[in-house]
Image (spheres, helix red, strand yellow):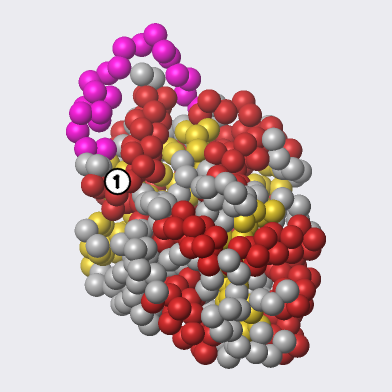
Amino acid sequence: MKGRAVDNSRRPNISWFSAMETALRVLFVTPEISPYAISGELAEFAGSLPRHLQDLGAEVSVILPRYRVPEIEALAVEPVFPELWVPLGEESVRASVWKAETEGRTVYLVDHPRYFGRDKIYGTPREEYPDNDERFIFFNRAVLEFIVQSGLETDVLHCHNWPAALIPVFLKTHYAGEDVLRGTAVVFTLHNALFQGEFPAESLALTGLDWNLFAARKLSVNGRFNFLKSGVAFSDALSTVSAAYRKELLSGKDAVLAGLLRPRSKRFFAVRNGIDLDAWNPATDPHIPVRYAPDDPSGKAECKSALAAEFGLEAGRNTPLLAFVAHLTPHKGLDLLLESAPSMVRLGFALVVAGLGDERSRQSVSRLSKAHPGRIGVKFDMGPALSHRIVSGADMMLIPSREEPCGLNQLTAFRYGTVPVARAVGGLKETVRPFRSGRAGGNGFLFRGYNRRALLDALKRARDCFRRPDCWAAVMQEGFRERPGWEEAARSYMELYRTALKLRRGA
């Protein structure tokens, strides 16, 4: 089934003018949100951007599954739809929807104990949940059923990553005739196209969609049902989180995804992520041992001492303390870190590693720490308090990613006078300006090749600058001058929503 064509000769109708003149009603459809359900950078995005959209006059609410995690369980919730029947395959499954008012916004929670009564979002450290296809097909249908059955008027559905990618498909098939959704636009954001939600073809039976869509490769890739690429094909507008990552996706290694995106490139936009400047502020941060500010960063030395003690490291004032904070996976550069760490120690660095990962990754990192006592410290944790202590106490933030659509570590590092040493990929090469001796303006150190030699060359340049106090102070101050907040991104998303509405409503 084809999406409705845009008739540019038709005058905008009264409902289109009304949506432009009144507050935009936006519903975020997301599998995660900070601080309640966190897996990656999407959680920070979904937790921060809505507040800034509201500052610009939008009415923003969020809908996600009601996982059984302590942060969600602690919310004060009330039932808004105690009995919601959701089509799933040849059956109808009973769900419920709850509502919480938190931080000035409404959060809706889709509840079904069999699908979401778990303490993880996508799976355990050992493996993904085997029924993720069924869980998120159900979630996508439940969101649209809730809108239809409750009459929740929505101008824009902003959907995120593969777990919400079937919303645009269902909207233009099963729900094409629903009055409450007539004219509702879909913006689909690809935060990380490495994760696509690919499942056996048989999963399509749970959607109730026509098999002709699968045969025509609108939903399928190499004979498998691909959620993310389905969302790309059916959304009114697409976005990703940096211009560099957009370029990589359009010409990248995933030829099928690039082939889908290129014909839609005029509907594919880049809006760089930001961070919450109030939460990430060393002058007011409640998590760090000593607060400090750009005009007097002397407190950072005490934060460094406390961090070294916490990780059992010998890292005095003259020892550069390097931090790696990320999921312990290959796309975050774990293999390159493991290969290069002994050489880092020989170069005079101390290293802090913090992250979550599978058992094999944790064992590899633990062996590394045991082989270099007092020089490499490890914690299998990515909690907010620890992350703040690390960024305040480290001298440098190591970001050796294979892929990095935007990256947040370098943005938080700037705020704390912590200098990024990063691979020139995705959003990292947009935000980290390489330091060059004799030139002003550098706020970090970059390397291009994904190999040990390139990484160590960058670390040598960083170490040499670190040993010259005037040089290091200049690089730190360039980072302090960055203001990577959400304000500009929020304005760009407001324009993107208006663009999506014009495309959807034929204006």
In the picture, measured across the screen, residue 451 lies left or right of residue 54, that is right
Task: Report how many numbered discs are placed on residues in the image.
Answer: 1
Q: Is residue 429 visible?
A: yes
Q: Is residue 214 visible?
A: no
Image quarter (top left, top right, bottom left or bottom right) of the C terminus: top left
Q: Which residues are magenta?
A: 3-24
Closer-to-camera residue (390/226):
390
Closer-to-camera residue (353/446):
446
Q: Quadrant of residue 156?
A: top left
In the picture, measured across the screen, residue 381 lies left or right of residue 213, that is left
In the picture, measured across the screen, residue 331 lies left or right of residue 176, that is right
Q: Report the residue at 50% width, 66% height from top.
A: 418
Prevailing secondary structure class for the magenta stretch in the rendered image: loop
Q: Amino acid at mark 1?
A: Leu
Closer-to-camera residue (85/306):
306
Q: Is residue 356 above or below residue 488?
A: below
Image quarter (top left, top right, bottom left or bottom right) of the N terminus: top right
Q: Which residue is mark 1?
A: 53
Q: Quadrant of residue 178?
A: top left
Closer-to-camera residue (449/128):
449
Q: Position of residue 87 (x, y in %)?
A: 46, 52
Q: For residue 12: magenta?
A: yes
Query: Quick one: SS at disc 1?
Result: helix
Q: Position of residue 375 (x, y in %)?
A: 66, 85
Q: Position of residue 410 (x, y in %)?
A: 52, 58
Q: Report the residue at 36% width, 80% height from top.
A: 290
Q: Report the residue at 29% width, 70% height from top.
A: 284
Q: Is residue 39 above or below residue 318?
A: above
